[in-house]
């Protein structure tokens, strides 16, 4: 996933572009580049590495410019090099791209027949060449013809050498938001790059061409019909998109969870009952559903595992959780009584979007749980339940995960009530408990002092295990990905009862095992599993509920949650797991917010 930005207006464009790229850097940071109009044409500056390197190179150029485009790259085609860095230029076209052109090789061969050869190994440069091959004097007509040849996902910002002051944009699958302000017109991959200039914005509709000038943005469809965009409004500000004094965005976002939970839960409670009417979701969505499929990736999929536990336990309707990149190539059994729930913080994850489209094609009803307003998954679902966590900048998802849990719990309670499986009183009881989770999480945030020394002991660990049963197994999956993605320590989540069927052979002296035992109904079994690994030399970090009776000799570290019913324990245990990952990565001196090889949202396959 890459970050793209374009600006044309009456202030220094370079500053707008560089500030925007800094804000978008979490989307990809292999290399960065800008192109802008000077008095004599278009100038391009590129730098491998983080945006700071580009800033250094740019300050040395004293060009005064009011129109340009900028790009932060997460490599998909071609290595990390200056030649592969965007913007790409061919003929009269200068272009930046977020996405993947799947047929770029065929197009490259066609262009070669005309004696046209790229200088980079990227699909994006081929796109620039194709647009240029159609360009005579009308940018809109060239773009319309060119995109007919392209297959795959793209968000383009394009400048034409003989159209100074203008930027053109079009998208298919990859995100683009835009707005016009007193300073000029600005377009970018997401709101963090626009928020400094305006809280009002629109999502560029797919397959529509935006023509940005200093004073306006004109949007036409591929049949030359002009349209007015639907304006949206964000309720967070620049401060929310900055670190707010924390060392890393991740720690800030861990601490934002009580507020994120409050903002996600409260608008969905009316007279003590779960209520989605403000979301445009009424009971007719759930009434005839006899099967639910949850499709998502990574942490979002782990939230789905918890959701499955809750929905099945209460409503007695079968729920399956599918990895979206698997689901999209399967031949799922779906009918009009199937509800497919897609979960996605960014709302732009390519695999999850593809899973949603497959579900709709097969006639399922679709509900998405999404954090980014107006994102592709949100817009393409029949219904969307927005989580209100605010911008999540750190690559490692924390507050988005716990608000996804809250959304799943709200769905589970409403669905079970509609199915007549729980009474109104029981539903209200659950809701009362759910309303306490922000306070419960607030209390958990102070356990960092207990966790940090434990994390320091994991510093030199090569590999470790997370084990649990039921909800705790689903949590183990989340704990494992959190630790791996930011500390680079290999870990594996294992159903505790399954360990002895092979993997326990890897448990030897001092191998760390993080055992989650918060669920009373399987607590005794967990104690046996902990004894099994202990007897083989494991170092055990145990996470339990408040009233668990634990023999001190059973574990090296015991972390006890404040009093909470088992069903809501995941909200607290999640904080412990987030802290373990965070403090281990900090102790290892790693860049917690921008771990190697990763990007915040994977908008390519
Ligand atoms: C979470 O910590 C990871 N960064 C990753 O697994 C993420 O959850 C996954 O890529 C899904 O992203 P989405 O929620 O934006 O769809």
Image (spheres, rainbow, N blue to C red):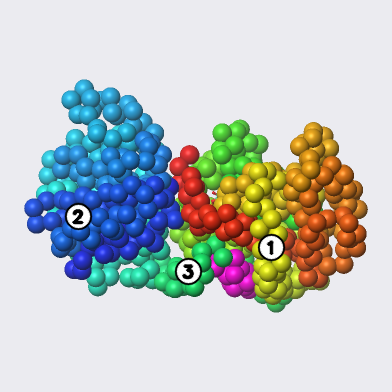
Q: Nearer the viewer, residue 177 or 591?
A: 591
Task: Decide whether residue 576 is among the magenta residues.
Answer: no
Q: Describe residue 419's horizontal placement relative to residue 115 as left or right.
A: right
Could you tell me what secondary structure mostly forms the magenta stretch?
helix
Whether 266 is among the magenta residues is yes
Secondary element type, mark 1: helix
Give the answer, above or below, for where 424 lies relative to 54.
below
User: Residue at coordinates 88% horizontally, 60% vertically from top-left?
Assistant: 552
Q: Residues within 10 Å of mark 3 (few under 14, many from 20)?
A: some
Q: Which residue is mark 2?
A: 36
Gap in Å between the C-alphas at discs 2 and 3?
Answer: 30 Å
| Mark in front: 2 vs 1 | 1
Q: CA distance from mark 2 to mark 1?
A: 50 Å
The span picked out in magenta is: 252-267
Mark 3 vs ligand 1: CB under 8 Å? no
Image location of residue 186, percent across then percent down: 29, 62
Observer-nearest of 266 and 51: 51
* Residue 539 makes an appearance in the image: yes
Q: Which residue is mark 1?
A: 453
Q: Look at mark 3 in the image and give the residue it sits on.
A: 243
């Amino acid at each position: 996933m890459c970050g793209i930005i374009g600006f044309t207006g009456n202030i220094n464009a370079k500053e707008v572009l560089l500030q925007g790229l800094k804000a978008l850097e979490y989307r990809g940071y292999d290399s960065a580049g800008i192109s802008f109009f000077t008095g004599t044409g278009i100038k391009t500056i590129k730098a491998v590495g983080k945006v700071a390197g580009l800033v250094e190179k740019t300050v040395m150029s004293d060009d005064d410019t009011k129109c340009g485009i900028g790009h932060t790259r997460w490599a998909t085609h071609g290595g990390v090099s200056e030649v592969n860095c965007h913007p790409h230029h061919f003929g009269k076209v200068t272009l930046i791209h977020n996405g993947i052109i799947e047929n770029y090789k065929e197009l490259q061969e066609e262009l070669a027949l005309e004696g046209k050869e790229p200088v980079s190994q990227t699909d994006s440069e081929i796109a620039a060449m194709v647009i240029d091959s159609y360009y005579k004097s009308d940018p809109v007509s060239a773009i319309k013809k060119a995109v007919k040849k392209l297959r795959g996902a793209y968000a383009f910002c394009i400048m034409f050498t003989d159209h100074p002051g203008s930027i053109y944009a079009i998208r298919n699958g990859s995100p683009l938001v835009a707005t016009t302000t007193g300073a000029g017109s600005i377009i970018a991959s997401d709101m963090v790059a626009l928020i400094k200039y305006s809280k009002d914005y629109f999502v560029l509709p797919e397959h529509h061409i935006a023509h940005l000038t200093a004073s306006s943005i004109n949007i036409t469809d591929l049949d030359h019909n002009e349209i007015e965009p639907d304006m949206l409004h964000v309720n967070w500000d620049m401060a929310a998109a900055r670190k707010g004094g924390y060392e890393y965005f991740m720690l800030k976002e861990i601490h934002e969870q009580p507020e994120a939970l409050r903002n996600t839960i409260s608008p969905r409670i009316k007279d003590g009952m779960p209520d989605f009417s403000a979301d445009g979701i009424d009971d007719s969505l759930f009434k005839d559903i006899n099967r639910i499929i949850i499709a998502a990736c990574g942490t979002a999929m782990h939230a789905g595992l918890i959701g499955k536990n809750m929905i099945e336990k209460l409503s007695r309707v079968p729920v399956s959780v599918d990895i979206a990149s698997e689901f999209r190539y399967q031949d799922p059994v779906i009918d009009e009584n199937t509800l497919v729930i897609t979960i996605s913080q960014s709302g732009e994850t390519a695999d999850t979007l593809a899973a949603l489209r497959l579900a709709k094609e097969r006639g399922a009803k679709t509900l998405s749980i999404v954090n980014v307003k107006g994102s592709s998954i949100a817009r393409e679902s029949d219904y969307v339940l927005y989580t209100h966590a605010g911008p999540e900048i750190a690559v490692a998802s924390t507050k988005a995960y716990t608000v996804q849990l809250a959304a799943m719990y709200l769905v589970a309670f409403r669905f079970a009530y509609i199915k007549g499986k729980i009474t109104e009183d029981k539903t209200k009881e659950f809701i009362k408990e759910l309303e306490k989770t922000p306070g419960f999480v607030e209390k958990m945030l102070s356990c960092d002092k207990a966790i940090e020394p434990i994390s320091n002991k994991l510093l030199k660990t090569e590999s470790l295990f997370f084990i649990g049963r039921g909800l705790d197994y689903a949590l183990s999956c989340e704990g494992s990905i959190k630790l791996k993605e930011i500390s680079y320590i290999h870990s594996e989540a294992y159903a505790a009862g399954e360990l002895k069927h092979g993997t326990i052979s890897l448990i030897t002296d001092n191998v760390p095992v993080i055992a989650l035992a918060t669920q009373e109904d399987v607590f005794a079994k967990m104690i046996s599993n902990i004894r099994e690994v202990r007897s083989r030399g494991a170092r055990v970090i145990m996470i339990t509920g408040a009233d668990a009776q634990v023999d001190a000799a059973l574990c090296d570290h015991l972390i006890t949650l404040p009093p909470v019913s088992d069903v809501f324990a995941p909200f607290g245990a999640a904080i412990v797991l987030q802290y373990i990952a965070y403090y281990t990565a900090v102790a290892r001196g790693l860049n917690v917010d921008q771990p190697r090889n990763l990007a915040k949202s994977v908008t390519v396959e």
